[in-house]
Image: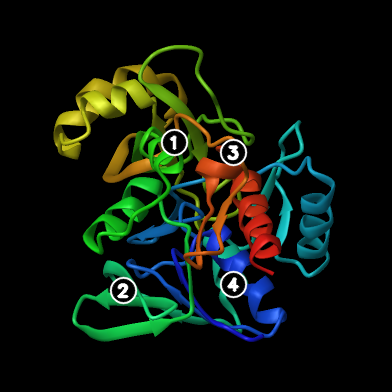
């Protein structure tokens, strides 16, 4: 029977879940607290420069995900990373294009902050900031697990004790992302750099990646989890002196602008034992990279697994 399903979180897990359930005839609404779609498949414009600020690329290993990526490639939505020696996939023209494409045809409410999820009358009532309550038959939570558990706690939802303990134990690494525009070309190689030591985990030039226009380098600099946790609340002006010495060899031109993005739930530090959780008695499901694995592929497969379980 067709059900009305609310999905909290418009990352790749929630969007693939929504598409699968809608294809099976369900009435689906996706609720996303931010303006963007795709979660950490995120892109930001700073003046004339464009940065992929979250996930830089993704890989495809599972046979079902390989088929999905092949279809995306045929449609021109994804392509191999230019100049990369390994098989890395990026969305075109930038990483957020994948979330936008997956949201097409779905009812997605952006800037929609769910405050509470409460089970009522064989369904759910969701309290939403500055909006009327939403009544649905089924609820799927694909946001970071601490956020999902907070919604349930606000509604005093009793989860099975063992599952509640397992979910509460899932933790995430933070990531600070510096977005640097240079005065001219940079010295980062086309396939990016993953330094062996220091505060920097990853550098990539979005110009060489085909994301940012013009001749000036546009660098995404991801800082390591430990460094990010220690300096998470620092402003960009205090971070730059700590980071610049370690990336000096890859700059090539002076830094003209520096923007900071904070990813509080960058990637799961621990992963659940199952690719998703579906509680038919409650009409409640969980999915995301904390279930499928700390990669774009893991999040995608988790959403697809929850769709199959709910079906």
133 shown above or below 239:
below
Quick one: quadrant of the N terminus?
Answer: bottom right
Give the answer, above or below, for where 305 lies relative to 23.
above
Which sits earlier in the primary sequence, circle 4 or circle 3?
4
Instruction: Tell me the CA gap for discs 3 and 1.
Output: 15 Å
Look at the image and tell me whether residue 287 can be seen. yes
The C terminus lies in which quarter of the figure?
A: bottom right
Q: Identify the mark nearer the N-term, 4 or 2.
A: 4
Closer-to-camera residue (183/120): 120
Query: At x 53% / y 31%, what residue is drawn?
Result: 188
- Report crowding for label 1: few under 14, some 14 to 19, many 20 or more residues within 10 A (C-alpha): few
For label 2, count other residues whose C-alpha is less than 10 Å away and answer few (under 14), some (14-19) or many (20+): few
Between the C-alphas of marks 2 and 1, the distance is 30 Å
Q: Answer whether labels 4 and 2 touch (C-beta < 8 Å).
A: no
Q: Which of the 4 quarters of the picture holds residue 95?
A: bottom right
Between the residue at mark 4 and the residue at mark 3, the CA separation in whole angstroms equals 19 Å
**Which residue is labeled 3 in the image?**
293
Q: Secondary structure at mark 2?
A: loop
- Nearest to viewer (mark 3 / mark 1): 1
């Amino acid at each position: 029977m067709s059900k009305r399903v609310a999905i909290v979180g418009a990352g790749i897990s929630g969007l693939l879940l929504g598409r699968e359930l809608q294809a099976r005839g369900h009435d689906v609404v996706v609720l996303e607290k931010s303006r963007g779609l795709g979660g950490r498949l995120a892109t930001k414009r700073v003046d004339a420069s464009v940065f992929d600020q979250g996930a830089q690329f993704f890989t495809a290993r599972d046979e079902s995900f390989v088929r999905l990526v092949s279809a995306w490639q045929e449609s021109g939505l994804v392509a191999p990373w230019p100049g990369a020696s390994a098989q890395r996939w990026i969305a075109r023209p930038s990483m957020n294009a994948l979330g936008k494409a997956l949201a097409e045809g779905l009812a997605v409410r952006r800037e929609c902050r769910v405050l509470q999820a409460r089970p009522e009358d064989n369904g759910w009532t969701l309290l939403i900031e500055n909006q009327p309550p939403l009544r649905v038959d089924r609820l799927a939570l694909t946001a970071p697990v601490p956020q999902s558990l907070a919604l349930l706690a606000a509604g005093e939802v009793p989860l099975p004790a063992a599952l509640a303990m397992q979910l509460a134990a899932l933790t995430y690494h933070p990531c600070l992302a510096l977005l640097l525009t240079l005065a001219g070309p940079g010295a980062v190689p086309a396939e990016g750099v993953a330094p062996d030591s220091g505060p920097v985990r990853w550098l990539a030039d979005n110009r060489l990646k085909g994301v940012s226009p013009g001749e000036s380098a546009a660098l995404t600099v991801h800082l390591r989890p430990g460094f990010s946790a220690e300096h998470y609340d620092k402003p960009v002006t205090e971070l730059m002196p700590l980071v610049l010495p370690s990336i000096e060899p890859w700059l090539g031109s002076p830094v003209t602008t520096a923007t900071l993005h904070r990813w509080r739930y960058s990637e799961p530090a621990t992963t659940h034992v199952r690719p998703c959780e579906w509680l038919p008695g409650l009409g409640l499901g969980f999915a995301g990279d904390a279930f499928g694995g700390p990669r774009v592929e893991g999040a995608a497969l988790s959403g697809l697994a929850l769709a199959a379980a709910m079906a």
